[in-house]
Amino acid sequence: MEPQVSSASKDPLKTSSVMVSDDDTVSDDDTVSDDDTISLYNIESSPDTRCDASFDSELACICWKTKYANLKAYVEQHGKLPTARECDWVSKQRVLYRKKRLSPWQIEELESIKGWTWDYRKDAWYSICDSVKAIIENKLSIRFSRYYRWYNRQKKYYKKGKLTPEKIDALERIKYWKWDTAPSAWDIKFKQVVESYRLDKEITLRREYAWVSRQRKRYNSGRMSDYEKRAIETSFDNWSWDDRKIRWKNGYDEIMQHVTEHGYFPVRYKNKWLNWQVRAYKSGKMDKGKMAELEKIPGWKKFAGRVKKPAK
């Protein structure tokens, strides 16, 4: 009587549990030919026992070497490594390497395979970058290529400050490369504020105070991209990310202007900023730099009164 063959052994190719994003995968759309299926099946399938890298038994060691030999033969035949979706065993070796569970001779064997890399995401990114470079420099349309989504994603990452300097440099070395993309809602509002600021600086900052304050809050909470930070710092004179410092300077300028024009201070209790400064000044707890600035206002010491000496 012939032995029964289980349905699991007929399974042509195991589906990998490792998902790779479009941003990192070079060959997402590659189809696996019949020859590929046979070779990948040989890599994925194992003898009677499940193989891992712990090498608790001689059979596990033989299993690993068998899969390694099949992988090497596949690369020699097809000139490339199978992707993570095509071969789960390759992904498992990278995971074991990161967990330091591969022996030195295993690492040496895997690194001897042509095209092997431990960081497939990084290598995939640079591989796609080279493909995009060839398209753009040959003046072909990137819009109708398979890399158009990747192309736009890099520009969005750049504006959000998510690209490393090395990746920015690699993209900027592409001839005809531009960072310009469709303007966002932030870009449109920023342009309106800057154009108004160039016409009248003081009125613009008061009118757009809510928007300006939101930008400072975003910066201080770490939610602002480098692109937005550079745009603001280079567009406004004497810009500061400290909102309290700006409010203090505005109040100081207002009092200085009033005293210069009229020769006397405004009514203290009708001006909240002035009232706060007098109280802080007299308490002796005010920052020395601010005290020195206030004393530059004509008649300040007489108006504010004596400074309370700190208790010994």
Image: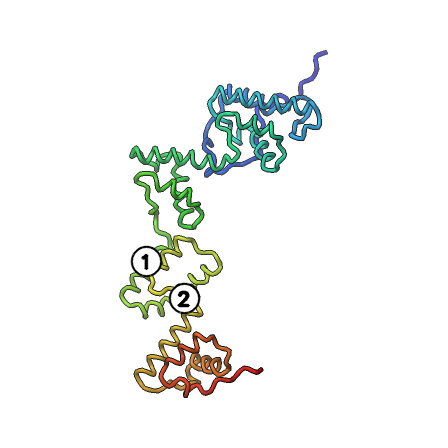
**Labelled disc at residue 191:** 1
Q: Residue at x 52, y 25 (%)?
A: 113
Quadrant holding the N terminus: top right
**Labelled disc at residue 68:** none
Q: Position of residue 307 (x, y in %)?
A: 48, 84
Measured along the vertical axis of the image, is residue 242 above or below residue 302?
above
Q: Residue at x 50, y 80 (%)?
A: 284
Q: Residue at x 41, y 39 (%)?
A: 150
Is residue 153 visible from the viewing direction of this image?
A: no
Is residue 259 visible from the viewing direction of this image?
A: yes
Q: Quadrant of residue 224?
A: bottom left
Q: Residue furthest left?
A: 199
Residue type at tag 2 = Ala
- Front-most of residues 49 and 252: 252
Q: Residue furthest right?
A: 1
Q: Which residue is mark 2?
A: 210
Q: Quadrant of residue 267?
A: bottom left
Q: Mark 2 Cα within 10 Å, few/some/many (few <14, many 20+)? A: few
Measured along the vertical axis of the image, is residue 217 above or below residue 279?
above
Q: Earlier in the sequence, mark 2 or mark 1?
A: 1
Q: Mark 1 Cα within 10 Å, few/some/many (few <14, many 20+)? A: few
- Front-most of residues 226 and 47: 226
Q: Residue furthest front?
A: 312
